[in-house]
Amino acid sequence: MSDIEKPNAARSMRDERVRIARRAMLDLPHIKPLSDFAADLRIRYGVEAPEFDPLDGGIHARILFLFEKPGPMTSSLKAGRAGSGFISRDNDDPSAEATFNFMAAAAIPREDTVTWNVVPGWNGTRKITGAELRAGALEARNLLALLPRARTVVLVGKKAARASTLFEDAGFSVFRSWHPSPLVRARWPDEWAAIPRRWAEAYASIIAHSG
């Protein structure tokens, strides 16, 4: 793996060479089924569903981090400063940077994780409708069928947490955490700072079960 492909720093997706290298990895066996899943959502919903990050675990992941909705920096089509086209902890925005740092603080191996959003596509607004949430939660359940090793879901943010019953009823271990956004940091700094501890608890439950 070249230096460009290594997950060595937050916000590395700001570098076009990094984005090009990640796109070249989308046909790798661990990520191709997830790339096909995202492509299908784009067709059926007409939204800009981002690519999964090939540096994460792909279909081998043991824990799904389900956020709320892609932000503008997942979009490679928006005007102005283009995003990466990926849902990634390496994106060039504050929430992604916090996610990168919190994953490191929680000591969660990247190859054990996969990241997605309960509302899968960016559609030009951060607002989330009830219909989007319901449809997205069902699609997230479809995603879990592609992750045979994942029995744990971390719902990141209040809106993502509204999908908890769906996963609990399906037999998954469900954890909830605050969202690592600047808004949460500004309004609820203690809760924001506690996020990595909660994520570590979720991962520890996997280790305990597998041991």
Image (cartoon, rainbow, N blue to C red):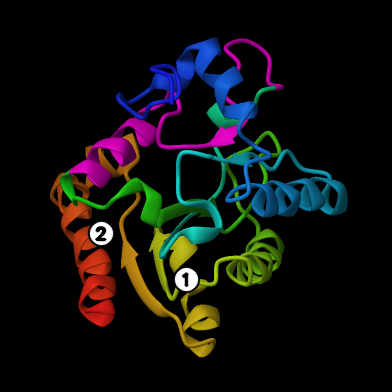
**Near-viewer residue (190 or 64):** 64
**Which residue in the structure is indicated by mark 1?**
149
**Which residue in the structure is indicated by mark 2?**
199
Count residues near mark 1 (Cα–Cα under 10 Å), then give few for <14, some for 14-19, many for 20+.
some
**102 sits left or right of 132 in the view:** left
Amino acid bearing label 2: Trp
- Residue 26 picture location, percent across and down: 65, 37
Amino acid bearing label 1: Arg
* Separation of residues labelled 1 and 2 (CA atoms): 18 Å
83 part of magenta stretch:
yes
Count residues near mark 2 (Cα–Cα under 10 Å), then give few for <14, some for 14-19, many for 20+.
many
Residue name at image x 45 percent, y 45 percent: 56
Reply above or below: 150 against 169. above
Magenta stretch, residue numbers: 77-104
Q: Secondary structure at mark 2?
A: helix
Circles 1, 2 touching at the beta carbon (< 8 Å): no
- Residue 153 picture location, percent across and down: 42, 68
